[in-house]
Image (cartoon, rainbow, N blue to C red):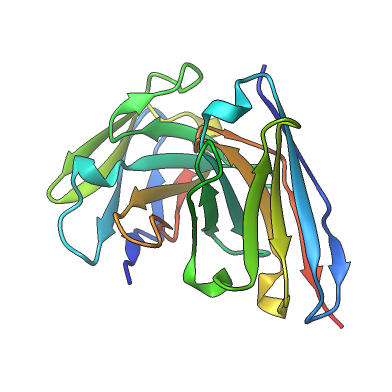
Amino acid sequence: QVQLVESGGGVVQPGRSLRLSCAASGFAFRSFVMHWVRQAPGKGLEWVAVISDDGSNKYYTDSVKGRFIISRDNSRNTLYLQMNRLRPEDTAMYYCVWGLGSWGQGTLVTVSS
Amino acid sequence: QAVVTQEPSKTVSPGGTVTLTCASNTGAVTSGHNPYWFQQKSGQAPRTLIYDTTKKFSTTPARFSGSLLGGKAALTLSGAQPEDEAEYYCLLSYNDARPWVFGGGTKLTVL
């Protein structure tokens, strides 16, 4: 069955960086678009970024453009989100989503001094 | 910049029918927006119910259906069960540099 396991979350100071990973299994990872979606505590879902199957096309929501980088390693079946210049408003649960159909359980990022 | 709007809350009686809607400030929602619907219960990760306006996943209960209604995307629940109490989010696709936008969510109470 499809499994998506996020990791890399934690507490980080404003302005610092963090890299999230999502290990995928149970499907042909290299053939599918992958997304990151986040949810701030007590708030709604926010789409963050998407990457094409071969990694050649990437799109971001405005609030993370220039700070976050989505990437993938199809040889390792792993999706990444490099988050730079983090802000307190980036505090959220970050979900890895396969083609908008299957969701991981999320990894919590807290940006606080 | 696109803004997607949902009703903040709705209440349905057990066994009743309710329709949640999803509107775009750019105009009528069409099949070209590839509407998705997600369910999120308290403390859980979201779950995808509907994609491409009307299509269901194998795990989507038959009582949920998607459609276009009056220029909006719609999610109809027919025969509400207590376990359907949750937050429901829609997601629309736009052909620009920020291709996906969530609505703010509808809190559905089964009472």
Q: Position of residue A112 (x, y in %)?
A: 83, 78
Question: How many callouts does the rendering have?
Answer: 0
Judge by depth and name the residue closer to the eye, A43 or B97. B97
Which residue appears farthest toward the left when viewing the image? B70
> Dividing the image into 4 quarters, which one contains the C terminus of chain A?
bottom right
Horizontal side of residue B28 vs B77, given as left or right = left
Judge by depth and name the residue closer to the eye, B85 or A107. A107
Picture layout, residue A75 above or below residue A83: above
Q: Position of residue B54 (x, y in %)?
A: 28, 29
Residue at screen point 21% across, 40% down: B31
> Dividing the image into 4 quarters, which one contains the N terminus of chain A?
top right
Q: Residue A45, can we see it?
A: yes
Residue at screen point 23% across, 35% down: B67
Judge by depth and name the residue closer to the eye, B39 or B86. B39
Horizontal side of residue B71 vs A40, given as left or right = left
Q: Position of residue A11 (x, y in %)?
A: 87, 67
Horizontal side of residue A71 vs A60, given as left or right = right
Judge by depth and name the residue closer to the eye, A44 or B27. B27
Picture layout, residue A34 above or below residue A57: above
Residue at screen point 38% across, 40% down: B36
Q: Position of residue B37 (x, y in %)?
A: 41, 40
Q: Residue B111, can we see it?
A: no
